[in-house]
Image (cartoon, rainbow, N blue to C red):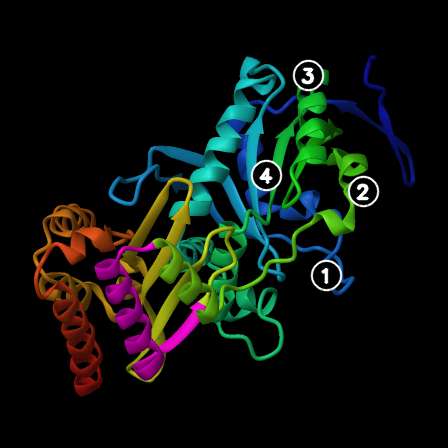
Amino acid sequence: MTDQSVFVLGSDLQTLEPAAFETEAEFQELLARHPRVLDFGSLADGQPLRLVLVAREMGVSTSAESGPAYWLDHLFVDADGVPTLVEVKRASDTRIRREVVGQMLDYAANGARYWPGALLQRSFEETCVADGRPLEEAYGELLLGDRSPEEFWSMVEERLAAGQMRLLFVADRIPLELRAIVEFLNRQMRQTDVYAVELTQYRGDGDLRVLVPRIHGEVATAAKSPSGRRTAQRTTRADMDAVIRARLAPEPSRLATALLDHAAARGRLEGGTAKYPSMSVYYPVAGRQVPIWTLSLYDNPVKEELAFSFGSLTHHLGLDRAAAFAESLPAVPELRKKLEMQRQKGYKGWPSVSLSALAAEPGALEGILAAIQELVDGQEAAV
């Protein structure tokens, strides 16, 4: 089908002709500067959707110890904390047919695992600074009620962990093969919405341009059963205790219980919303609640993992405090190796250690609890 001209009627009739985007970079820049062209649908309260740019060329890691292996074209977020991943291709790029789907699923799977809230917050604020946009103005579009930025990005992190996100394939022409794949994925994926956005450009005299978006995938989204969408349920302490008793060996069980008891007495426990039981712990540091560690009890494969939120520590307390905390943690071989890699990368990841490895190291639990207390007391004394 041949694209027809578009006519603008003012004092005269002006003809706008279909025009391709000259480069993919031009296409990407347009979306970064004008995300309104991707605003369709509404928020949970019925208000219009407004996407806000978190980062362009958002790095995607494939492990807690590695740097970015891939780069997502755009990451947006809305006021409900739902992340929107956008991959842009021109119709002339043959990857728009199938390869881009594999890329996007890679980004979604690894972003859900390796994008902590602190990293997302830092990326968003750095983007605002680079664009010359005041943070107060940018957050005004995202923060509802008296929610703090930290609470908002923690919610975004939880959405990612639960698979609650949008995946947008954007092109100047969407081939039938991609449209079919998008509609299939959208019918099968209950937590994630998948769309293809065909953005046609028309040019007239001078700088006049008209952009016409067409959305593919909304029919499949509407066909999803509301009851089929899992309401994210937070893990409770009772849930954790039940899994610990049923699954863990005696010594890892003792360690897990002691860590959770310490957190309940001195910090704040917050249950995760992923499919596996998990709890994150916030400790009061310098008058704020800072996330320090997360305990996850995976079931496929079966594994228990204690991960330290160094991205958040570095963001909230600074690189020196994060480095000092890393040095004060016990010298468990499995953990030490990962901490050394974090040192080289600026303490931005989630180095983890299994409870089994901690159990094999005498005094490891006491060393971790002492390091946490030193971090909390030392920072409080410094302010």
Mark nearest the camera among 3 and 4 is 3
Give the residue at mark 4. Answer: 30
The image shows residue 83 at horizontal and vertical percentages of 56, 50
Q: Which residue is mark 2?
A: 222
Mark 4 or mark 2: which comes first in sequence? 4
* x and y percentages locating residue 229 in the rendered image: 69, 49
Q: Secondary structure at mark 3?
A: helix
Q: Do the residues under discs 3 and 4 have CB atoms within 8 angstroms? A: no
Q: At x 58% / y 61%, what residue is drawn?
A: 233
Mark yes or no: residue 234 visible: yes
Q: Nearer the viewer, mark 4 or mark 2?
A: 2
Distance in Å between CA atoms under marks 4 and 2:
29 Å
Up/down of 184 relative to 360, above or below: above
Q: Can you say whether 209 is above or below 178 in the image? A: below
Task: Name the amino acid, label 1.
Answer: Ala
Q: Quadrant of the N terminus?
A: top right
Which label is found at residue 44?
Answer: 1
User: x, y percentage for residue 109?
Assistant: 47, 38
